[in-house]
Amino acid sequence: MRLKKKSWLTLLSVAGVSMSLLAGCGNGSGGENATAAAEGSGAAASGEPTSFNFYFTGSQNVKDLWDSLEPMFEEQHPEIDVKMVYIPSGTGAEPTYDRIMAAKQAGKGSGGIDLYEDSITTVAQGTKDGVWTQLSDSDIPNLSKVDANVMKDVDNYAIPYRSSAVVLAYDSSKISNPPTTLDELIDWIKANPEQFAYNDPSTGGSGSSFVQTIVYKDLPEEDIHNSDPSVMEKWEAGFNTLKEIGPFTYGEGIYPKKNQGTLDLLMNGEVSLIPAWSDMVLQQLNEGLLPDTIKMQQITPGFNGGPTYLMVNQESDKKEAVNTFLDFVLSPEAQAVVVDKMNGFPGIELSNMSQDMQDKFAGVSEGFRTFNIGDLGTEINKRWQSDVAAQ
């Protein structure tokens, strides 16, 4: 099935003009992976395990996750060997996506990269470039456990195996009935001076999500998937609301830096309600950094959120082995490890998880939205600095 023009344009709007590409594993890695691929191709005939190369990047918790899942998978499937290549955040010399594209354009197969993990930005670019394989539950049965609407967003060219979202985090010892709608939140802020805080939107996604949600509050739903500059003409009412509530926020208009800045205020009891990333709240609750009175609540319309994706290289000759691995990753057993290690939402629908897991995410794992506004996010931050922070 070919990707509809409208679909990939919508996806590509997320990517923006410039791509922030993952880095490769440095000089000489191409030769090593070519050797690995050659060895894997002869594995079936020799009775040796079929091997494929999985590239991923991120912080230490991402590595910990795959270090846990890989041996679980290989114990169940000794006929498959997952060759993991971890690229720590901020390191590496050769952009991985460029390497995939170079191999494709040169007719040299997968470039030694069979499976790739990244964000919606790379999903969009790879879909446009014809890099990714379109996936189906006939090849990956557990794909049927993923929300069909989420798969539709990427036209089945990627698997959302984990997710997180911005939610309201609040101190339940002070708030018994947190706001459930955006209008209720605005009213609560005004009725409880200096008990709400959000960070400078240019320094962290939770503050950015709050600002964008306010700016787009009364706009048509389709505008949160539109990067056309003409949408900027509709922002006036939203920015007026942000200016109006400014004196009622922490310090009568003090905006902490980074996502952690507002969490620190909540931790210390200086405020009682903030927007925050769900995975950060869960991690810090688990580590005892936040008091156990801190709870989470999604609102309507929801703050933004989104998955991290796995993509299969169209040029890979190991698709059968890769699909077996992906089916395992989407199993409730593996998804429980994903939740434990990443403190995020499972990639499959909660109804497929244990009751304890469903209870854990009640009220926060659903209802979030994905804002695909491209470079308009930067324009919002600029205007926030001049219209709100400077008032």
Image (tube, rainbow, N blue to C red):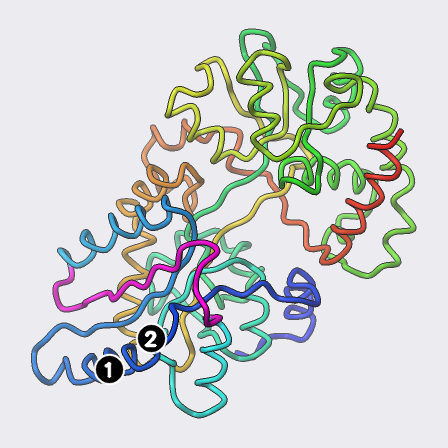
Marked residue nearer the N-terminal end (1 or 2): 2
Residue stretch rendered in magenta on the structure: 77-95
Report the number of numbered marks: 2
Residue drawn 28% across the image and 47% down it: 334
Q: Which of marks 1 and 2 is in front?
A: 2
- Where, by quadrant of the figure, is residue 262 drawn? top right
- Where, by quadrant of the figure, is residue 218 drawn? top right
- Helix, strand or loop at mark 2: helix
Q: Does 43 sit above or below residue 55?
A: below
Say few, some or many: other residues with alpha carbon within 10 Å of mark 1 (under 14 / 14 to 19 / 20 or more).
Answer: few
The residue lying furthest to the left in this view is 47
> In the rendering, which numbered label is found on residue 29?
2
Which of 60/295 is in front? 60
Q: Does 322 sit above or below residue 63?
A: below
- Amino acid type, label 1: Thr
- Helix, strand or loop at mark 1: helix
Q: Does 112 sit above or below residue 172?
A: below
Side of 366 where 11 appears, left or right: right
Question: Residue 13 at what x, y percent from top left?
Answer: 69, 63
- Where, by quadrant of the figure, is residue 42 drawn? bottom left
Which of 232/176 is in front? 232
> In the rendering, which numbered label is found on residue 35?
1
Question: Residue 61 at what x, y percent from top left?
Answer: 36, 44
Asked if residue 109 is among those painted magenta in the image, a careful observer would answer: no
- Amino acid type, label 2: Ser
Say few, some or many: other residues with alpha carbon within 10 Å of mark 2 (under 14 / 14 to 19 / 20 or more).
Answer: few
Residue drawn 41% across the image and 47% down it: 59
Which of 341/34 is in front? 34
Q: Does 178 sit above or below residue 27?
A: above
> In the rendering, which numbered label is found on residue 67?
none
Side of 163 where 388 appears, left or right: right
Side of 151 where 384 appears, left or right: right
